[in-house]
């Protein structure tokens, strides 16, 4: 081991220990250890992996702290790998010198407005484990090209920018697992302007990543308006925040109505998601499955989707525990979406709506909508509303009215809605009845029973 104390570091929080850490990385034996102490840095410590060789940096079980007193990352790991993760694409020198750099059991604190925690560029199998990064701009900042990144058991807490930022990166095979990522003003996990494949976000606590002075706070944001983000999972996480302007717990953003393919092929499964203006905001994405989640307190929207294709929502509980106070609209809005499968959803309104809407679920300009075995309980005004939609089927579902007395009808159809089938449902009766089929040839209803 190479203790940075042996290279002149003081670790008293006052002396400049930058040169000592840089020297230990360049001249040590590859296992760089920071004993207990506070090590002040006045510039970025660069880690050129092709020159340092196989490397680990350890903070002695979390007892060591880096204090970054300058702009830029405290540690900048730089590799030379420029190709894919396919084994034949790796040069022998990368395997011998650069593979699997690790940083573990270390705290990094920012003392400059533009201080970052760790930046990684061109690395193969970089592994970050057991880190605490706080009061920085960006916590973990991935840029350029990397492969097979592991981020595990880290605390990325109370940073001014993004907690884990995939920033205009070409990056495949990334696992973010078992972390606390919270109170980061510009987002918890953000991917922007990148080409990303195989992104796994699993078993994390991703909370309170919001800024009441911003317009688009998000806990997890996959932004493919420039770039592509495909093939991944958001599984088994707790994703919660506070109501903020334009905020969303999970946001997938694609190019636009003519190209829903840039972001998608994602599974959002087994999460607890709640307490934002919108829980799930899906824009121009394709092939997204949202299943088995507990979703609550979307102040305006539980789900808002626009220009999406091949969406599956199945087996989710959309609720707001009556013990938790506050208004919550929890509405669903689908605009210009195609091929929607909504099955086994349990939706119950237990609070006064924060933003009155015409229906629990609204579909505008959508096509190929299949709603089956869902329960919409205590619908405030309407259960379902379809406007100018094509190929609509509602089957084996229950729509029950709220007791407010404002209920109008279970199913509303506006404009051209055909073909349409309404079959084998329990439907509440409101001021305008339960539903009225459009006066067209391709509209059928049978097997329905009304609820008082």
Image (cartoon, rainbow, N blue to C red):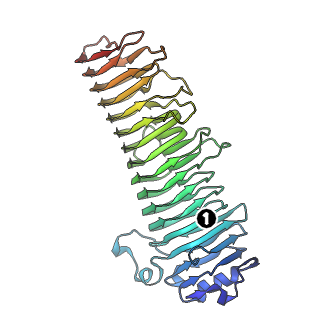
Q: Quadrant of residue 305?
A: top left
In this view, which residue lies farthest toward the left?
Answer: 447
Q: Is residue 21 visible?
A: yes
Quarter of the image for the N terminus: give it. bottom right
Q: Measured from the top left, where is residue 264 in percent x and y?
A: 40, 48
Residue at 37% x, 10% y is 433
Q: Measured from the top left, where is residue 96 in percent x and y?
A: 43, 84
Residue at 64% x, 56% y is 158
Q: Measured from the top left, where is residue 24 in percent x and y?
A: 62, 86
46 up-or-down from 405: above or below: below
Q: Quadrant of residue 197?
A: bottom left
Q: Quadrant of residue 418?
A: top left
> Is 431 situated left or right of 42 in this image?
left
Please name the residue that numbered disc 1 is placed on.
133
Residue at 58% x, 51% y is 187
Quarter of the image for the C terminus: give it. top left
252 up-or-down from 396: above or below: below
Q: Measured from the top left, where is residue 143 in percent x and y?
A: 54, 64
How would you rate the neighbour count of disc 1 (Cα within 10 Å): few for under 14, some for 14-19, many for 20 or more? many
Q: Is residue 254 visible?
A: no
> Is 344 situated left or right of 294 in this image?
left
129 up-or-down from 158: above or below: below
Q: For numbered disc 1, what is the local secondary structure?
A: strand
Looking at the image, which is closer to me, 189 or 193?
A: 189
> Is 108 situated left or right of 240 in this image?
right
């Amino acid at each position: 081991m190479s203790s940075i104390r042996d290279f002149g570091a003081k670790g008293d929080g006052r002396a400049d220990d930058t040169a000592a850490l840089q020297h230990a990385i360049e001249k040590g034996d590859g296992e760089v250890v920071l004993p207990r102490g506070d090590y002040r840095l006045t510039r970025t410590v660069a880690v050129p992996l092709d020159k340092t060789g196989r490397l680990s940096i350890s903070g002695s079980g979390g007892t060591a702290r880096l204090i970054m007193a300058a702009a830029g990352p405290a540690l900048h790991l730089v590799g030379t790998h420029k190709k894919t993760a396919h084994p034949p694409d790796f040069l022998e020198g990368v395997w011998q010198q650069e593979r699997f750099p690790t940083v573990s059991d270390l705290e990094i604190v920012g003392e400059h407005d533009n201080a970052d925690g760790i930046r990684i560029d061109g690395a193969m199998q970089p592994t970050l484990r057991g880190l605490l990064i706080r009061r920085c701009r960006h916590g973990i900042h991935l840029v350029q090209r990397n492969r097979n990144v592991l981020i595990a058991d880290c605390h990325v807490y109370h940073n001014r920018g993004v907690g884990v930022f995939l920033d205009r990166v070409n990056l495949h095979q990334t696992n973010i697992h078992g972390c606390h990522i919270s109170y980061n003003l510009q987002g918890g996990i953000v991917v922007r302007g990148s080409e990303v494949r195989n992104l796994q976000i699993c078993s994390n606590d991703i909370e309170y990543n919001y800024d009441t002075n911003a317009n688009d706070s998000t806990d997890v944001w996959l932004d493919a308006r420039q770039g592509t983000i495909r093939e991944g999972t958001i599984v088994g996480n707790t994703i919660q925040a506070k109501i903020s302007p334009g905020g969303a717990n999970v946001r997938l953003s694609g190019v636009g109505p003519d190209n829903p393919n840039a972001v998608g092929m994602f599974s959002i499964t087994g999460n607890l998601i709640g307490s934002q203006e919108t829980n799930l905001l899906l824009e121009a994405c394709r092939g997204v499955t949202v299943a088995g989640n507990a979703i609550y307190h979307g102040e305006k929207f539980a789900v808002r989707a626009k220009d999406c294709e091949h969406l599956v929502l199945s087996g989710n509980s959309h609720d707001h525990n009556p013990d938790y106070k506050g208004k919550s609209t929890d509405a669903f809005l689908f605009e210009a979406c195609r091929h929607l499968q909504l099955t086994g959803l349990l939706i119950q309104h237990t609070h006064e709506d924060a933003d009155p809407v015409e229906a629990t679920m609204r579909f505008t300009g959508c096509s190929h909508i299949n709603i089956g075995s869902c329960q919409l309980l205590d619908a405030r005004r309407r259960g379902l509303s379809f406007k100018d939609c094509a190929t609509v089927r509602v089957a084996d579902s229950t729509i029950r009215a709220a007791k407010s007395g404002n209920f109008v009808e279970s199913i509303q159809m506006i404009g051209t809605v055909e073909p349409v089938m309404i079959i084998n449902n329990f439907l509440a009766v409101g001021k305008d009845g339960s539903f009225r089929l459009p006066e067209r040839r391709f509209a059928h209803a049978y097997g329905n029973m009304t609820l008082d």
